Amino acid sequence: MQESTKSVILVCMVILSLVLSFNLWFSNPSYEESKYLVSEKIQFTPPRALADIILPEKIVAVSGKGRFNIFYPEQVLYEEAVKKLKEDGDQGLTAFQEVTEEEWLQAIKKPGLLFYYDYPCSIKSVELWEQDKAKKIFLPLGEKEIWLVNPEGGYFMGFLEKGFLSTLFESYFSSGREYDYCILEGDDLPADYNVTIAGEIYLSERETTMMVLPGEKEKLDDERLVKILFADVSKVRRFEEKDGAIIYTDGSRGVRFYPYGAMEYTMASYIGKILTGDEALKTAGELISLYGGWPPNLYFWADRCSSPGQLFFRSYYNGLPLLSSDGCLNLTLTQRGAYSYYRRLIIPSSVPSFQGKIISGKEAVAGAVAYLADKGEPEQGIRLKDLYKGYYLLDGLEEGMELWPTWVVEVDGAGALVMNAFNGKIFQFIDFE
């Protein structure tokens, strides 16, 4: 009898908890009224145009001798290359002609710049041509040719009126520069597993040290964001949770500000059609400017976007992406605005707390393959898509939050394995499904 009474009490407590949670988010409870009485739509930063969102994932400097260097977002040479690609596209362009894969492979052996796009680059968005999209663009240095691979795997070649001209890159290629990267070959892969390579993976052969960086949370303007997010701020109620999070809700939507610097906004239900593709990106360019603004180091992460309408962005530090278990910024958009919006930006300190030698790229690949195979190797085997360095956010440390050096191994059609660059231990598998 006593056990039966306890069970009844437990069930009642669970039901009460569910009712209270529902009322908190989706009704008009009599919590403390928000002091913000006027809705405002003032941007934190200017919006970003589509051409400034769909940017290369990386740009490879091809030496012409089988060696390479790589430029990533936030690096000076990356920004210069993107700028010159847009400028030189205004010179005039002949109609493209289809070429063979062999002709493409021969072309990209010349010195020049090879642009890789996660998201198919609308030619209109880089102001080069309007009839197609590109996943790769190659510009031979000092020549008039321009080569591309479209999303369907077709190869094309056209001509720019004056060719790709850049004093900076002419100096870069003629300076006797060292090239740190080669292409990962099949012989470099672990022989005990069914492993293949999807595309080109660039492998650094230089021994590298990296730093652990303390991080600081972004300081969000909560008051201003509440005024922007709610159409009628007079109906908004404020609620404070035990963990220090602050919630604002008007019954149809809610926003939670976490004490560690994140914000999470959700509507109770979808309103209007989910936006996808270029349409979603154009809308994101405007809404992110309203919902906290565009920091200069925030870039679109197309490979992470698997669910319809959901867009992911990540920030960079000195050309390396910053990763975390919850992500950096993601949103789902409808015709009526944002259905969901999550934002947590970390500001790295330039003063390291530790510096040490990291494992090699080959060791990272071997460790990733062994880990994935242990989890259950798929029938078709493991297809490696990319390899690069980054930083991973560790929370809850006595020292506060820290950004730890990582190797990121992307697996085609699956996700990204994030591992400690010092010892190869796994931080997280980011599922792209």
Image (cartoon, rainbow, N blue to C red):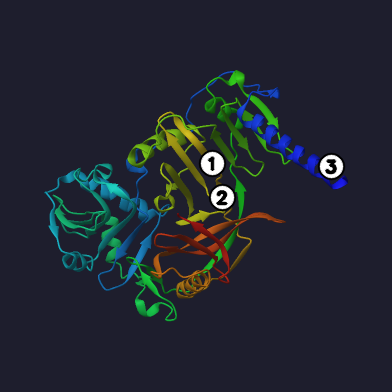
- Farthest-out residue, front: 1
Between 403 and 78, the residue placed more toward the observer is 403
At 54% from the left and 25% from the top, the residue drawn is: 230
Name the amino acid, label 1.
Tyr
What quarter of the picture does the C terminus occupy? Answer: bottom left
Between 79 and 328, the residue placed more toward the observer is 328
Mark in front: 2 vs 3 = 3
Instruction: Give the residue pinned by disc 1.
Output: 342
Instruction: Give the residue pinned by disc 2.
Output: 326
Query: Mark 2 to mark 1: distance in Å?
Result: 9 Å
Q: Mark 2 touching mark 1, by CB under 8 A? A: yes
Q: Can you give x and y, in whole percent of width and height, for residue 431 in the image?
A: 49, 56
Instruction: Give the residue pinned by disc 3.
Output: 5
At 63% from the left and 29% from the top, the residue drawn is: 248
How crowded is the residue under tag 1: few (<14 C-alpha within 10 Å), some, or many (20+)?
many
Left or right: 222 with respect to 56?
Answer: right
**Mark 2 falls on what kind of element?**
loop
At 60% from the left and 60% from the top, the residue drawn is: 352
Vertical placement of residue 367 versus 141, above or below: below
Query: Mark 2 to mark 3: distance in Å?
Result: 40 Å
At 41% from the left and 55% from the top, the residue drawn is: 75
**Mark 1 falls on what kind of element?**
strand
